[in-house]
Image: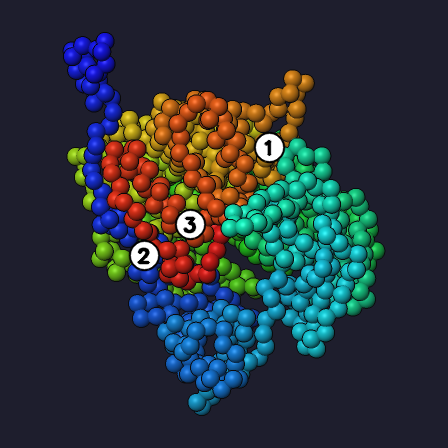
Amino acid sequence: MHPRMSRAALAFVLCWTAHATAQPGRVYTSADYAQAERWMDYKVDPLVDHTVADPQWLADGRFWYRDAGPDGVTYTLVDPARHTQAPAFDHTKLAAALNAAIRSGKLMPSASLPLQSSHLPIDDLTLEQGDHVVVVTIGQRVARCDLHGAGQCRQAGELPSPAYDLSPDGRKAAFIRDNNLWVLDEVSGRQTQLTSDGEPDFGYATDNSGWIHSNHPLLVWSPDSKKIATFQQDQRKVRHMHLVSTADGHPDLESWPYPLAGDDNVIAIQRVILDVDARRVIRLKMPPDQHRSTLCDDLSCAGGHGWDDVQWSDDSAHLAFVSTSRDHKQEWLRIADAATGDVREVMQEKVATFFESGSGKTVNWRYLSQSNEVLWYSERDNWGQLYLYDAATGALKNQITHGDGNVIDVLHIDPKGRTVYFTAVGKQAGRDPYFPALYRIQLDGAGLKLLTPEDADHEVTMSPDGRFFVDIASTPTTPQTTVVRDDDGNTMVDVAHQNISRLAATGWKPLTPITVKARDGRTDLYGFLFKPTRFDPAQRYPIVDLVYPGPQSGSCGPRDFSPAHRDLQSLAELGFIVVCIDGMGTPNRSKAFHDALYGDMADNTIPDQVAGIRQLAAQFPWIDASRVGIYGHSGGGAATAAAMFHFPDFFKVGISESGNHDNRIYEDDWAEKWIGLLKKNPDGTTNYDSQANQNFARNLQGHLLLIHGTMDDNVPPNNTLLVVDALIQANKDFDLLMIPNARHGYEAATPYVMRRRWDYFVRNLAGGIPPPDYRITPWAEQQAARGQGPSDDGD
C-alpha cells in the first residue's frame, strides 16, 4: 500500500480499474482453434465436388476441363456442336501406358510414381487421330500416347524453361539470354541471337522493374511468326532498393532498380520490332516511352504472360500500341510501320484523374485492321463504355455502349458480323452491381443483348471462333452451374453442377451478403458478413473488419461461390462477427465512385468502414460496436494503421500486415497513378504528406500489431519501420513482428502469422486467453491440399 493512500481510496482505485479493464474471459483450447481452422480453404475446398475452373478450348471447337469428384479427377471433353460430353480418354489405359514408358526409360518422370488413373497430374492435353492419340504435358515433359490396343507412350519433347514465348505457328520460342533476345527453332533446335547490344539494366524484353522479378520475355509475335514487337528497357539511371538477408554469417545483399514516386529518373522503354529471319532490329521512330500500362502498374497485367497495349495488324505489316503518360492522365494510340519504324499518332485521350482501359483481366481497346478502325474504352461519361474510331483519321465514329454499368472485358469481336461480345457489371437494375454478365452488341451501338440472364456472377470463356462460350454461374451463397451456350445465348450442353453436400454435412454455413450506406448516407456499399457456425443471437459479439482500400481492388474480392474467403470464417469461429465492405474508391462502380480517393490515399475508405459498421450494429443487436477490430495486408495494412491513427476512439485493435504506409517510398507507378505526381512545396511539405501514416502515429490509443517480412521486395520493410520509429518517438506501446527473409506474402511463415492474428484479436478484442503455441497446418501441406507448389501471394 502506498503510505499516503487510505483504504477507502485504494478500494475506489481497485473498483475503477476492474470496471475499466476487460475481465479475463474465455480460455480458448487447441480444439477451439482446430474448429476455426477447419473452415480454411485447404480444409473445405476438397469437400466440394464438380468444380469447373479454367476450361481449355481446342482448335476443333471442343474444350476440356478437370472434373474433380469424391473419387478423383476426370479429364472431361465437351463437344458443344454435338451436345455431348464424356471422359477425354481412357484414364486407366493412359495411366498404365505412362507408367510403363517411365519404367522402360522412354519417358523421363516428371511426377512421383506410380501415376494413379484418378489423379493424373496433366497440365495440358491435345487429341489426335480420332482421339485415339493423346498428347499430354506433365510438368516440363511432353508425352505422345497412342491408346490403340494396350497403349504406348513416348516422350515427344521437353518444354524449354518457363521463361519463353512461343510463336503463333508453334515453331519458334523467344527467350532472354544475357540481356539480349534469342529465338529457339523448335524443329532443328538451333538457337539464334536477335539482338547484341543488350546490357545490364538496358536489356531487351525484360520484365524486372520495381517489384517485378521475372525472366519471362515481354513481347508480341506477329501473326505470321516472322516479327517480334518488344522493347529495350532502360533503367540505368534508376536508383536502387537494398535489402539484407538474415543469415548465420555474412548476409546477402539484394540490390535492384526500384524507382520511387517523385524520382527524377524512372524506367523508360525504347520500342523495337525484330525481323526474326533477317535478324534485324527496327527501332520505332519516336522518343522513349514511360514504363506504363493502361490497365495496371506493370507492362504485363497477366502476371508476366504477354505485353499489354500492343497489337499487330492481321497482315503483320503494322503495329498498334498505346503510350501512357507518367501520371496515367494521358493516352496516345499510335500505329507503326513494321518495315520502316515510322510512327503516326491516331488519337489521344486526357483525363483529370487517371485513365484505365478496363477493370478486368485484359485491356479493352482493339485494333480492327481489316476495317481500319479502333475499338476504344473510356469512362468519359462516368461509366466504362466502348467507342468506335476511324484508325485512319482518328475521328470518333460512334459510341457503342450506353447507360449505367461498366464494360469489364472485351472477349470477342466478329469483324464480319460487326458485333462485339463483352462482360459488364451494373447494367441490370436490382442486381448486385458486382455480378458480371455477358452481352453482345453491334459496333454501331444497336442490338444490345444479354446472353447470361441468371442473376449471378458469370465467369465466361469464349471459344476462339466465338461460336460458343462456357458459362460458370454462381453467387457467394449458391454453388456453380456450368453450361455451354451458343453465340445467341442458347444452352447447348449442361456441363456440371457443383456439389457441396459433403461440405454441408460438416456444419459449414454460407456467408451473409450485406448492403450499407457510405459515409454520404446515400451511396450503397456491398460486402460480406461472417458469423460463428454456432451463432447465438443472445450474445454480443465483437466485430472485426477486413479492409483493402483499393484503388485497384476492394476488400471482399470476387462475387462467385467459394467455400472459404481467406480466414474470415475461421476468425468468426473464435467468437467474432467478421465483415468486409467495399468502400468508395474501389473499382467496378462508377468513375466518380472510383475517383473518391484520388489524390488522398489517407482516406483508405475508413469513413465508409466506420459508417457501415455503425449501421450493422444498429441493425443487429448481437454486434458490439464498442469492440471493433480491423486488419489488412499490403494496402490493407496501410489502411489498418490509418484507421487506428485517425479513428482511435472507434477502432480498438488493429493488425497491420506489410503496409505501404508512405507511398513516397513505394514504387513510382502505383503511387503516381492513384495520388498524382509528387509535388514539393516551398516550405518542404508535399502533396503526399497526408497519407504518410508515421505522421499520425502519435494518435494511437488501442492495440496495434505491425507485421512485415524483412525481404519484402514489393513493399520494402522501411515502410513499417518508419511507423515504428514514429511510435517510439511518441512513446506509444505497440507490438511488432518482423519475419526474417520473408517476402510480401510470408510464404512458409503464413500459418504462424495467421495464428498470431487470431491470438491478437482473441486476447485484446475478446478479452480471452489463446491456447499456447497452437500449430496451424504447415504451409507446404496447405499448398499440397490446394494442388499448388510453393508460392508468394500478393496483396
Using residue 262 as the reference point, say whether residue 666 is left or right of it.
left
Label 2: few (<14), some or many (≥20) within 10 Å?
some
The residue depicted at 24 percent of the width and 38 percent of the height is 769
Looking at the picture, tell me which residue is in the foreground, 657 or 740.
740
Label 1 sits on residue: 664
Image coordinates for residue 587, horizontal then vertical, percent: 50, 39
Q: Indicate the quadrant where residue 785 lies.
A: bottom left
- Residue 400: x, y in percent? 59, 45
Q: CA distance from mark 3 to mark 2?
A: 18 Å
Crowdedness near tag 1: few (<14), some (14–19) or many (≥20) residues, C-alpha within 10 Å: many
* Residue found at x 68% / y 64%: 174
Q: CA distance from mark 1 to mark 2?
A: 40 Å
Q: Which mark is residue 43?
A: 2
**Helix, strand, or loop for circle 1?**
helix
Q: Report helix, strand or loop for mark 2.
A: helix
Residue type beneath disc 2:
Lys
Q: Which residue is mark 3?
A: 749
Q: Earlier in the sequence, mark 3 or mark 2?
A: 2
- Amino acid, disc 3: Ala
Q: Is residue 499 left or right of residue 153?
A: left
Spot occupied by residue 531 in the image (x, y as percentages of width and height) = 26, 41
Q: Say the numbered circle drawn on residue 55.
A: none
